[in-house]
Amino acid sequence: MLLAGALLLAGSSVSVAATAAVAVTNVNLRAGPSTAYPAITVVPAGGAITAFGCLAGYTWCDIGFGPYRGWVAASYVQVVYRGAPVVLAPPIAPAVGVTVVTFNRAYWDRYYTAYPWYGRWAAYPPPVYRPYATPVVTSHSRSVNCADGSCTGTRSATGVYGGSTTQTRSCADGSCTATRNTTGPYGAGATRTRSCTAGQGCSATRSFHR
């Protein structure tokens, strides 16, 4: 409700190149993408903000809050994705319209000439760009089935180079057994089985194959 209300308030002034959002908690709006830069103001929890873009890697974002313009760590920015409020993260940023931007002297000159620390541009550290790494998992699945007092859960994932791993865990009558099978892209693999029984402890076995 808080996010939806804030987005309605911000929506009328948001341009096509911007994304309506809210602050996750009270957070300093800073003059650059680092805690080393001076704080301009404090954005309150639930405050309506506008995201104009983020650094490569989506670590810090260029934010508008009322008459102020500055930077906030992406982990403090909440957006709507597929109808639900979520914290801004690299996988969803492009989908909600948050693009990659840069921080430079031109930005500093445009927004901060009236501040007492404006002339100290060279005293602050340059921004650190951490490009977002492409995910190494190409597919994954997870399922849980329960019946007659027992449950079995299975999850699996396939890597970008062809390797895969599957883990199955079954529990019934106070005992659980988990087996994980991993196969590398060239066929070598390993199997690990761990069994635990209430009051009797656990045991594990491992095996490898080429």
Image (cartoon, helix red, strand yellow):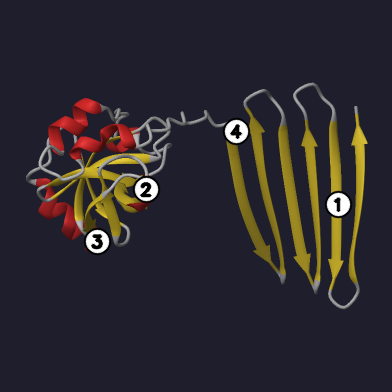
SS at circle 4: strand
Residue under circle 2?
A: 35
Characterize the local packing of mark 4: few (<14), some (14-19) or many (20 or more) Cα atoms within 10 angstroms.
some
SS at circle 2: loop
Please identify, in this view, whether the residue under mark 1 or under mark 3 is nearer the observer.
3
Quadrant in which residue 19 is drawn: top left
* Residue 95: percent from left, percent from top: 33, 35
When the figure is inspected, residue 148 is found, relative to residue 185, above or below; the finding is below
- Does residue 93 appear to the left or right of 50 in the view shown? right
Which of the two labelled residues, at mark 2 and mark 3, occupies the earlier sequence position?
2
Residue under circle 4?
A: 137
Which of the two labelled residues, at mark 4 and mark 3, occupies the earlier sequence position?
3
Q: Amino acid at mark 1?
A: Thr
- Does residue 17 appear to the left or right of 94 in the view shown? left
* Residue 85: percent from left, percent from top: 32, 54
* Residue 150: percent from left, percent from top: 73, 67
Q: CA distance from mark 4 to mark 1?
A: 23 Å
